[in-house]
Amino acid sequence: MHATLRAVHSGRMHQEPAKLRTVLGWAAFLACSWTWCIGMWLPVILARDYGPWAFMVFALPNCLGAAMMGVLLKSPGRSERITELHPGACVAFSGVTCAFQWFFAAWLLTPGTPTGLLAPLAAVLLAGVCYAGLRGRGRVGVVSGTVYVASLALLALWMFGTEAASPGPFVPASIDAPGLALLAPVMIFGFALSPYLDLTFHRARRALPGDAGNSAFIIGFMVLFWLMIFGTRFYAEPTNALAAGIGAALSPALLAWPLLLHVGMQLGFTIAAHHTSVRVGPTGGRAGAGVLLLSAPLGVAAAVAAPHLEIGMFTGAEVVYRGFMGFYGLVFPAYVWLCVIPRSGAITRPSPRHVLVFVGAVLAAAPCFALGFLKDREEFLPIGLAIVLLARLLIPATPAPQPLRLLSNEPDPAHPDQGSLA
């Protein structure tokens, strides 16, 4: 009897560390896959345009929105239902994200800054290595943890090195508090809803059913991801000061070599994470192959065309960057708002009316977002956001069974158990 109890206790003691390692591994996977998905260059731009408080407007909705996605999809079947009923939107999210990473890597190849080669080379090499590693069952935690620790170490190397000293005091041309207040609702809208189309998030949520998944999302975004993006608070000011001091346009190619390697690692991991998540997702290998074939040339083509797209004070590369941000601030969250969780509150397949309302709302709101993001006319941003929010009224509210509702705690009868996609 005592031997049996000792064996059971020993088994539990062995399982608990293993479970903790699994949770931490997936938490690192989430933190790394999201770090450059939304773009850690954005805080640098926001600091230049709005002042130091812009970091909090960026960071808090970002961390909370991503963490809440995992918590709200705890009930079995919720994640599966979204990806099975909206596979095109989920694959489009991964495709745009991968093209965005390739564009950013190509942006670093600015003439006259040879150190910019570090990031693209690191991105290409790490994308291949991580793709092979993340495909293997049971290796997600090892690969993700290694990339996370190495990325954080590069940030620390820069922070405690001599290159971290600012070339001089940087003060934004004007601390635009009213503009930041008008931008904040758009940031909240985008960060709260875009994660529901991220296949890397769905992969993690299914691999860790129940409370373990909640822990991974909370640790991943409220601790690990927060530490990673907090580094932007330290390199935003020196980078802006350097650009102002030498009279150059703000560009990530101005970053010191540890930061460039950090960027390259994050770009490569994000690309690999999305390719592998598409591969194991509802659309299988064909969609993954399509994303792999199209995202790189599209991203590089955007970088090649960028010099001809200058608008006002913004360089062409920054215009393209802001255009990619428009997907995460308008297109993807609008799709979730209008097609994934329409007025019934249920996770449903979009009807032609849903799609029509979504397309109409995005087209109507796009000029307002363009004026806000490209012409510094932030007063138009609330108008564009209101158009999208009110478009929900054009979708009829139809009753749905409680288990099909997004916020329901009851299991989806079609998916009583969540399987592992690890």
Image (spheres, grey):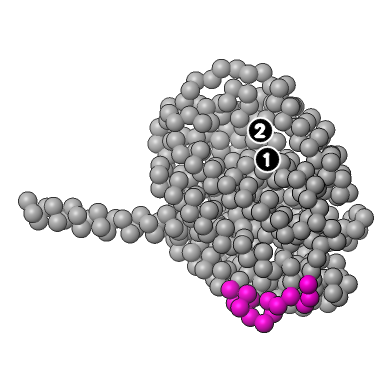
Task: Write the residue at 65% across / 58% down.
Answer: 36
Residue drawn at x 56%, y 35% is 82
Identify which residue is drawn at 14% across, 56% down: 6
Please state which of the two labelled residues, at mark 1 or mark 2, is closer to the viewer: 1
Checking the image for residue 337, the label placed there is 2
Q: Is residue 168 magenta?
A: yes
Estimate how packed mark 1 is, as few (under 14), some (14 to 19) or many (20 or more) residues with alpha carbons within 10 Å.
many
Q: Position of residue 107 (x, y in %)?
A: 78, 64
Residue 362 falls left or right of residue 289: right
Q: Earlier in the sequence, mark 1 or mark 2?
A: 1
Q: CA distance from mark 1 to mark 2?
A: 9 Å
Q: Is residue 100 magenta?
A: no
Q: Given the image, on which type of amino acid does mark 2 rest?
A: Trp
Image quadrant in which you'd find residue 383: top right
Q: Position of residue 59 (x, y in %)?
A: 64, 53
Label 1–label 2 contact, CB within 8 A? yes
Instruction: Decide which of 237, 247 is in the foreground and name it.
Output: 237
Helix, strand or loop for disc 1: helix
At x 84%, y 54%, the residue is: 319
Residue 123 vertical position relative to residue 22 in the rendered view, above or below: below
Res 313 → quadrant = bottom right
* Residue 284 visible at all: no
**Left or right: 230 with respect to 105?**
left
Residue range corresponding to the magenta coloring: 156-169
